Image (cartoon, grey):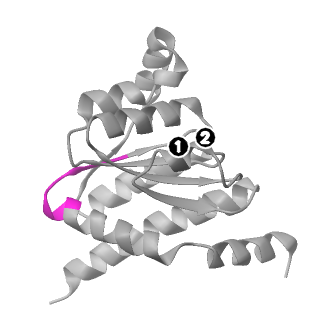
Amino acid sequence: MNKLMSELKIAIGCTDSLVYERTLELVKTSKASNKNFFFIGNGGSAAIASHCSVDWTKNGGMRAMAFNDGALLTCLSNDLGYERSFSFPVHRFGAPGDLLFAISSSGQSQNILEAASAGKKALMKVVTLSGFRGNNPLRSLGDLNFYVPSNKYGVVEILHLAILHSLLDEVIADAASP
């Protein structure tokens, strides 16, 4: 087994099942209450956010969106500064009880931190997905926090995507049950 696969296997074992179960219950409750689901991230995490917003909308029947439209990001970054590129739309679109998934491999991206804070101020539920350092600042901003104990982007990003897909798969399976 190569080194990356070994690290991935160890990181999977560190995923907190209690956080997972609580997040799954929050997702199911939010869906039943017709709440909005928002996904934010930069770079690879933006790709995860975009991918999940589409899947959660199409396959999960949820109102989900990612704030990574090029025109939106460049406008807000130019006019307000990149650090506010996600907090502004979270403030504009988020409502109490909506669910924000804040994804950052390092847990240190200023625009993700500000958006998570904006979500809390808007009385949204905030779920964070981070990695690298165990004491990264994003972990202190979530109602629920997934932390991947790795400093490799591949391991962290793959597990973030796997966690989000797994949550969706369980919601879909639950809806299909008689």
In percent of width and height, residue 78 lies at 50, 11
Mark 2: few/some/many CA within 10 Å (<14, 14-19, 20+): few
Three-letter amino acid code at the position of disc 1: Ala
Most extreme residue toward the top, as rendered?
A: 79
Identified at 14% across, 90% down, the residue is 178
Could you tell me if the residues under marks 1 and 2 are in contact, i.e. CB atoms within 8 Å?
yes
The x, y position of residue 46, in whole percent, is: 52, 43
Which residues fall within the magenta stretch? 30-38
Q: Which quarter shows the N terminus?
A: bottom right
Residue 68's image quarter? top left
Real-space CA distance between mark 1 and mark 2, rounded to the nearest whole angstrom: 5 Å
Residue at 80%, 69% in the rendered image: 4
Q: Relative to the observer, which residue lies in front, 101 or 16?
A: 16
Q: Is residue 167 magenta?
A: no
Q: Position of residue 118 (x, y in %)?
A: 37, 32
* Residue 58 spot, x, y in % from top left: 28, 59
Residue at the image point whose x is 54% and y is 50% from the top: 139
Question: Element type at marker 1?
Answer: helix
Note whether residue 110 is visible.
Answer: yes
Q: Is residue 8 left or right of residue 174?
A: right
Mark 1 neighbour density, 10 Å: few (under 14) some (14–19) many (20 or more): some
